Amino acid sequence: MSATTEPTTTPAPTAVTTPAKEPGQLTKETYRGRIHPDWCPGCGDFSVLAALQTALFELGLQPHQVCVISGIGCSSNLPGYVNTYGMHTLHGRALAVATGVRCGNHDLKVICTGGDGDGYGIGGNHFVHTMRRNVDLTYIVMDNQIYGLTTGQCSPTSVKGMKTKSTPHGSVENPINPIPMAMVGGATYVARAFSGKQKHMVQMFKGAIQHKGFALVDVFSPCVTYNKDNTYQWFNPRVKILEEQGHNPTDLHQAIERGFQWGDEIPIGLFWRRTDLQSLEDLEPVLHTGEGPLAFRNLGISPEQAKRLIQELL
Amino acid sequence: MNKIDFAVGIGGENGQGIASTGNILALIFARRGLHLNAYNAYQSIIRGGHTFLTIRASDGPVRSMGDKIDAFIPLNQDTMDRHLHLLKSGACAIYDKEKVTPGNAADGVQLCPMPMKELTKGNKLAVNTAALGATLQLLGIESEPLETVISRQFMKKGDAVVAENLAIARAGYDYAAQNFTAFSWKAPRGAKPLGIITGNQTIAMGGAAAGVKFYAAYPMSPSTGVLMWMAAHARELGIMVRQVEDEIGVMNMVIGAAHTGCRAMCATSGGGFALMTEAVGMAGMIETPIVCVDVQRAGPATGVPTKTEQGDLWQVLGAGQGDYARIVVAPTSQLDLFHTIPELFNLCDKYQCPGLVLSDLLISEGTTSIDPDDLNFQVKIDRGELILPNGNGADNGSGAIAAANPASGYNDKAYLRYKNTPSGISPRAVPGVPGCIFTAATDEHDEDGTLISDEFTNPQKRRMMVEKRARKMQGAIKDIAPPQLVGQEEADVTLVGWGSTAGVIREAVEKLAGEEGIVANQLAIKWIVPLHAAEIGAILGRSKNVILVENNQSGQFARYLRSETGFAAHGHIRKYDGEPFMPHHIVEAVKEQLGGKSRLSVPVHEVNA
Ligand SMILES: Cc1ncc(C[n+]2csc(CCOP(=O)(O)OP(=O)(O)O)c2C)c(N)n1
Ligand code: SF4
Ligand SMILES: [Mg+2]
């Protein structure tokens, strides 16, 4: 019989006597994860990862105060590549899990990452409702207009007519346009970035992370393996930075109009931002009792509370 | 001394105030110290959205709705027609003589027609109040308790309404005193005043006692009562309550909150649970403790939303793909739900796995009396090997766990979230703890959390992690009490049930002994996974005749029992008409089976269609 119950590789407990050290100086290296990404060489997601690490560094966020949460997909592998707390959840569920994390510990900076299929397809319901709740988190969608991990099927953002493995004769469906959708859905910070413009992306991320409320950054992050239509070469001449064009992100009509623009000129940058709506966490009195995050509070109820509850039954 | 045991049945249309009438009666009985059980058979039993509420009370234990009605209050003709024939000698029927005509009643049934228009001064909504007054008079209960409860019940509607209802109750009471014959017995008094409670309330209160800080739900009968209690008490108790877009979101949110260190819980019914199951597997894979209650209703699909069934066993057993550690428990009563929830949270925290509770409409929506002293909210709390940044974790602030997992800088690699230990339990740090950084992944992962799912081939690591998680259940079973045989060891028949049927089976056993001279004993199974298969197998192996009683069609527990113990029950009693068992259903089926007539009995619920 095999010794199925014996652990085989447990290393001896290390450094038990070492007292807790003060964490050292934050550097860009601090945010590098344990393992190197296994994305295809040239994948747009490398740029997103680098931009996120830079944004975290420039904002001086401590790695243990940040939780990066993803679904499933090539892009959703990102949490493992960044040195912060992470959750690599189920396909489409990052935002629901993240809302729970924010409720449990509203001191954490929560950043969700994932793909277009993950967020706008299978996770579409959570996307809509997390926006309307204005949960204070940043949502970075690596939008490659394709299902990468499952080797190249049509996605909710694939353009009409696009030939993919699941639409060999060209897609007949209209794609989702996440920018106006997010604006109408209640997101309070709506931006777009492009993997070919990493510095600009860092600015979009920093703004999103600092924003109080739901912030979406949809990133054109080309899949070099399965999307031969929407490539770096295709985007490069088309993308125009809103910040360089005097766009006013508090003008709803202008923002919607720019959000619908597609073709020879495709805007990237901050489309829309409002600061007049409170976040879910702000509006939930249970979080503002002065006892800190729910997760760390004392458990159970007091004898006085118990007495009141029992009184209701008599 | 002989216990007095009686039941009141009230039936009518929705909107005739049946639930509130039932509530008033239940409160009066409980304050008198009587034990009681109230079950509301609503909607589909009687066409046209009718409902029939049975409240049974006694100075002895009451574990089911019982078999008979003593005071019958049909608020409309339909109810009269459907139930009158079930009354036995000694019972009485109280009704509006202008609106309802009785059919043929059995000998010895007292018909109590009342001039309701006159007694209520034309207030149609108050007919039930007049009937209540009459019922209490017949039961030999003074009028004061009724007046107290009515005053409380109608307080919000203003003094005029209170005064009117008091006068009507009094009129009904006096009319009965002058015109009808009271029961030959009087409603007894119990030792001390009791309260009343439903199972959905005890689930929620058990959660509050356990320290639940996050509760999420999507409304679904018959579990919604838990959400309503939580929402009503959230601010007072410091619990975050969220109504989510769907049950998929519910379970994922609960896992998110639990991952941060909260005790987090949700409740739903079978359809909602079906949507949650992928995420339940996530809780198993990332080893996050959560508690989810499935309040079963008759399925499949939308099924019968207002009817009870024990039909979700295999759904819960099979929830989520793959093998993973989980705990499944089917509490046996409302009070048992209260005690089980905190116990389950401790187990889930210790073994870092999801805990699934099988309740059902019968106990979740059913009302029972409760001794306040049985509701101890100061429960034992064991959070297992949890590492929180503020010392509220397993080490109670001693720093022992933090010392073993030193924060040696931002890029610390000493901490292994999924450390392969002999028990399978790995110290669990939550986000926010310095120096324990890791990513929790639903892909298969190594001890430090990094993915191994994409490695070309690593069967050794995969096997190690599968076994690490599975090993946790070997410890868990030792923390769970094995089931005990109730009654004489030597018996003609052993009745086996699981979850909510424990009470009615117990009463059937008593009835078999008292009325039929048949010696039966009972094995009530509560902890389903892990299952004490050896102990159960040994007990049943010694039994002459094992009959499995369950509220479903296909014998879900019979099949599970067989798969886990190899033991095939000799006979089966199954009910799947939406209504719960009554003791006599089981008694008659046992007689039928002992007489060799059948190996499968399906009792008929006696109500006119
Ligand atoms: C419930 C469920 N359905 C399907 C899958 C298979 N699946 C994994 S990733 C994926 C799509 C990925 O596309 P996207 O989210 O755009 O991410 P990308 O790989 O393009 O970055 C699918 C369909 C799954 N993991 N879970
Ligand atoms: S398949 Fe596409 S999305 Fe996935 S890693 Fe390769 S390039 Fe990136
Ligand atoms: Mg994609």
Image (cartoon, coloured by chain):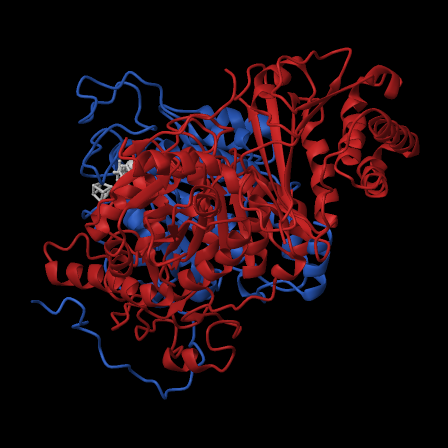
Is residue A203 or residue A107 the one in the foreground? A107
Residue B315 lies in what quarter of the image? top left
Is residue B435 or residue B535 the one in the foreground? B535
Q: Is residue B399 above or below residue B455?
A: below
Tell me the residue at 34%/85% (across/down).
Answer: A16
Q: Colour of chain B?
A: red
Whether residue A302 is visible here, answered yes or no, is: yes
Tell me the residue at 40%/77% (across/down).
Answer: B407
Q: Position of residue B263 (x, y in %)?
A: 50, 58
Residue B447 lies in what quarter of the image? bottom left
Is residue A39 or residue B511 the one in the foreground? B511
Which chain is depicted blue?
A
Q: Position of residue A34 (x, y in %)?
A: 27, 64
In this view, which residue lies farthest toward the left? A1
Q: Is residue B346 above or below residue B302?
A: below
Q: Position of residue B200 (x, y in %)?
A: 56, 44
Q: Give left or right: position of B572 versus A307.
A: left
Q: How many marks?
A: 0
In this view, which residue lies farthest toward the bottom? A17
Which quarter of the image is occupied by the N terminus of chain B? bottom right
Tell me the residue at 34%/71% (across/down).
Answer: B411
Q: Give left or right: position of A124 versus A161.
A: right
Q: Is residue A47 above or below residue B71?
A: below
The image quadrant where one finds ligand 1 is top left
Is residue B583 or residue A146 the one in the foreground? B583
Q: Is residue B242 above or below residue B490?
A: above
Whether residue B319 is visible here, answered yes or no, is: no
